[in-house]
Image (spheres, grey):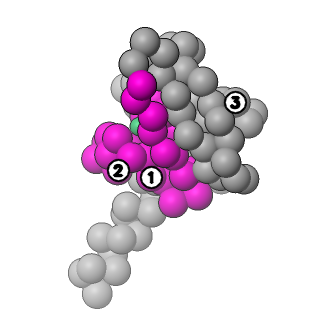
Amino acid sequence: MKNVINDSTIAKVNQQSAEAVCYHVQQTGLSKAVICTTGTSARYAVDISINECSCVFYQEELIPRRHAIKLLTSIGRDPKDYCSDIILLNIWGDVCRRS
Ligand SMILES: [Zn+2]
């Protein structure tokens, strides 16, 4: 499938990846993990199979944020692949609502 994401999305993902380097991943399932931040006790539950993170940025921006990116890169996936999937899902969601 053709990758449909644009340069600004790629730049955002790269920036989020850079900010995620200090996090720790505790994988809790095939697509799930708890992301631990250093310096604070904050923990975020991520599930990439349903595009969710407990910090809600993922759902709002429709691209993986730093917690999801941390999980994706730790299991050898490219976060950019998940951007186009989410955008496509969003387009289909609009089509469904109109019909
Ligand atoms: Zn998050």
Q: Residue most toward the front? A: 41
Q: Earlier in the sequence, mark 2 or mark 3?
A: 2
In the image, residue 79 sits, relative to residue 97, either above or below, namely: above
Q: Residue 33: x percent and y percent?
A: 60, 43
- Mark 2 → mark 1, Cα distance in angstroms: 6 Å
Q: Residue at x 60, y 24 (%)?
A: 24
* Front in this rendered view, residue 47 or 86: 47
Q: Residue most toward the left? A: 98
Q: Which three-letter amino acid code belongs to the residue tagged 1?
A: Glu
In what quadrant of the picture does the C terminus appear?
A: bottom left
Q: Is residue 28 left or right of residue 56?
A: right
Q: Earlier in the sequence, mark 1 or mark 3?
A: 1
> Residue tagged by mark 2?
59
> Residue tagged by mark 3?
74
Q: Secondary structure at mark 3?
A: helix
In the image, residue 50 sits, relative to residue 8, either above or below, namely: below
Q: Secondary structure at mark 1?
A: strand
Residue 14 visible to the viewer? no
Q: Residue 50: x percent and y percent?
A: 51, 60
- Mark 1 → mark 3, Cα distance in angstroms: 17 Å
Residues marked 2 and 1 touching at CB (< 8 Å): yes
Q: Which three-letter amino acid code belongs to the residue tagged 3?
A: Ser
Q: Residue at x 57, y 29 (%)?
A: 70
> Residue tagged by mark 1?
52
In the image, residue 45 sits, relative to residue 12, either above or below, namely: below
**Counting other residues with Cα less than 10 Å from the Cα at mark 1, is it few (<14), some (14-19), or many (20 or more)?**
many
* Residue at disc 3, CB closer than 8 Å to ligand 1: no
What's drawn in magenta, residue-wise? 41-69
Q: How many marks?
A: 3
